[in-house]
Amino acid sequence: MLSRAAAAHAAASLRTSIRANAGARIVVATGASQIDFLDALTAASGVDWSRIEMFHLDEYVGLPIEHRASFRRYLRDRLIDKAGIGRYHLLNGESDAAEVARKVGDDLVKRPIDLAFVGIGENGHLAFNDPPADFTTDDPYIVVTLDHACRRQQVGEGWFPSIEEVPTQAISMSVRQILKSIEIIAVVPDARKAEAVKACVEEPVSPMAPASILQTHADTTLYLDYDSAALLTPSR
């Protein structure tokens, strides 16, 4: 239900942007939480994917594209090849990370991003901006060091057999760059995310709960299931 609802919303936004601007620029998240959403989105009717330009949200440094945890591989398999996106910008973590961040960032900032798809990590991270996140940098992409909780999540989701095999660094879209997106759709299922959701929704905005910054964005929609919303205070 969550994934279908989020995908219907996303498809409608994409169709609107394509009609208004003859195209759409998007940012796409990866990970276990996004699989059902992307399946539903690529099945949606009336989206002209040939008019969509896609940017990569984050990628591990040093991980081969053949690895099952590679986000480049994930996006090719689950979105690019499936939908027929012709124009996309992937982050090559096997190359010089700082140079890749600069080069893709230069392309990213040429025009506004119409729609960003994001998730929230178990530690509250937004993209790979782990706590305490940098809320001030204007660089569109940055090279970050992943904290223990973030790396443990990747093992728990089955992408790596042990934490020792999870890369310690990643290229990530910066927080301020994500907030420059005209619209943001956050898809956050699963009980494992409940504590992070509560911190990011009900507590004050803080770098210690990076996705709490979404509270400040003018057009963000957060899609939760019963499990991820379980700790939220019921409204009266």
Image (spheres, grey):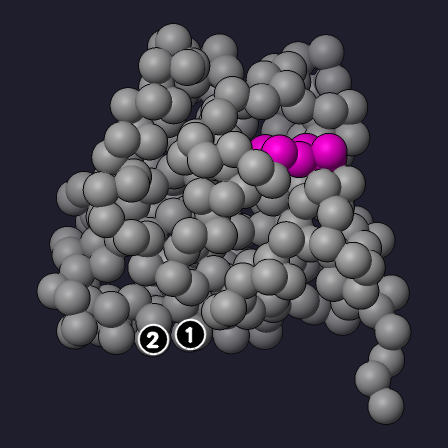
Q: Left or right of 154: which side holds 179?
A: left
Q: Which quadrant would residue 114 be assigned to in this image?
A: bottom left
The answer to whether marks 2 and 1 mark residues whose Cβ atoms lie closer than 8 Å is yes
Residue 86 rendering spot, x and y as whole percentages: 16, 44
- The residue under label 2 is 12
Q: Considering the image in quadrants, where does the N terminus appear?
A: bottom right
| Residue sitting at the far left | 22
- The residue under label 1 is 8
Counting every numbered tag in the picture gives 2
Q: Left or right of 149: which side holds 71?
A: left
| Image height of 219 relative to 158, above or below | below
Q: Left or right of 84: which side holds 220?
A: right
Residue 106 visible in rendering: yes
The residue range painted magenta reads 128-134
Q: Is residue 216 magenta?
A: no
State the residue at coordinates (66%, 35%): 133
Q: Which quadrant would residue 129 be assigned to in this image?
A: top right
| Image height of 48 relative to 135, above or below | below
Residue 180 rendering spot, x and y as whole percentages: 42, 52
| Residue sitting at the far bottom | 236
Residue 31 rendering spot, x and y as whole percentages: 56, 41
Residue 27 rendering spot, x and y as whole percentages: 38, 48
State the residue at coordinates (72%, 11%): 164
Of residue 221 and residue 79, the one placed in the foreground of this image is: 221
Of residue 187 and residue 208, the one placed in the foreground of this image is: 208
Type of amino acid at the residue the image marks with label 1: Ala
Type of amino acid at the residue the image marks with label 2: Ala
Of residue 67 and residue 122, the one placed in the foreground of this image is: 122
Of residue 40 and residue 120, the one placed in the foreground of this image is: 120
Give the distance between the C-alpha atoms of the residues marked 2 and 1, in whole angstroms: 6 Å
Q: Which quadrant would residue 235 be assigned to in this image?
A: bottom right
State the residue at coordinates (66%, 23%): 146
